[in-house]
Amino acid sequence: MRIGILTLTISLPGCGSLKEKRQRMGGMHQRYGRNPSVAVCESAERDNLDTSQWTFVVTGHSLPEVESLCSEIEDRVQRSVDGRVIETAREIL
């Protein structure tokens, strides 16, 4: 079994409240938490209105499977979130 940790830092320019921030992030837990191979949480910048950081822990039987799922998550976040991914970090254990 392989484990991947994907951390995305997202810029939310013009965000004026925590409520707006939650709306712009658009249900990350619901979208990615349904997959039994993925755990997701807002890992930093919780009180910062214009930045959000999310960490995804991905498990799989092989390295290519974990890397593929990490890439899929990264692509979907970039397309679906009303913000801009400014930093990406990956670690494979």
Image: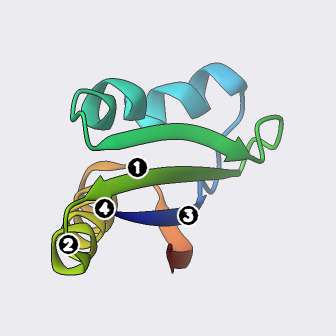
Q: Quadrant of residue 35?
A: top left
* Amino acid of disc 3: Thr
Label 2: element kind: loop
Label 1: element kind: loop
- Give the crowd class for mark 4: few <14, some 14-19, many >=20 residues within 10 Å: few
Could you say where residue 48 lies in the image, as x and y percent from the top left?
81, 43
Q: How far apart are the alpha carbons under marks 4 and 2? A: 6 Å
Q: Are marks 4 and 2 in contact (CB under 8 Å)?
A: no
Q: Earlier in the sequence, mark 3 or mark 4?
A: 4
Q: Earlier in the sequence, mark 1 or mark 2?
A: 2
Q: Are marks 4 and 1 in contact (CB under 8 Å)?
A: no
| Residue at image coords 40%, 49% | 82
Of the residues tagged 1 and 2, which is closer to the observer?
A: 2
Q: How far apart are the alpha carbons under marks 3 and 2? A: 20 Å
| Residue at image coords 53%, 77% | 91
Mark seen at residue 82: 1
Name the foreground residue: 67 vs 60.
60
The residue singled out by tag 4 in the image is 1
Q: Earlier in the sequence, mark 4 or mark 2?
A: 4
Name the foreground residue: 20 vs 53.
53
List the single residue furthest toward the right: 47
Q: How far apart are the alpha carbons under marks 1 and 2? A: 32 Å
Q: Earlier in the sequence, mark 1 or mark 3?
A: 3
The residue singled out by tag 3 in the image is 7
The residue singled out by tag 2 in the image is 62
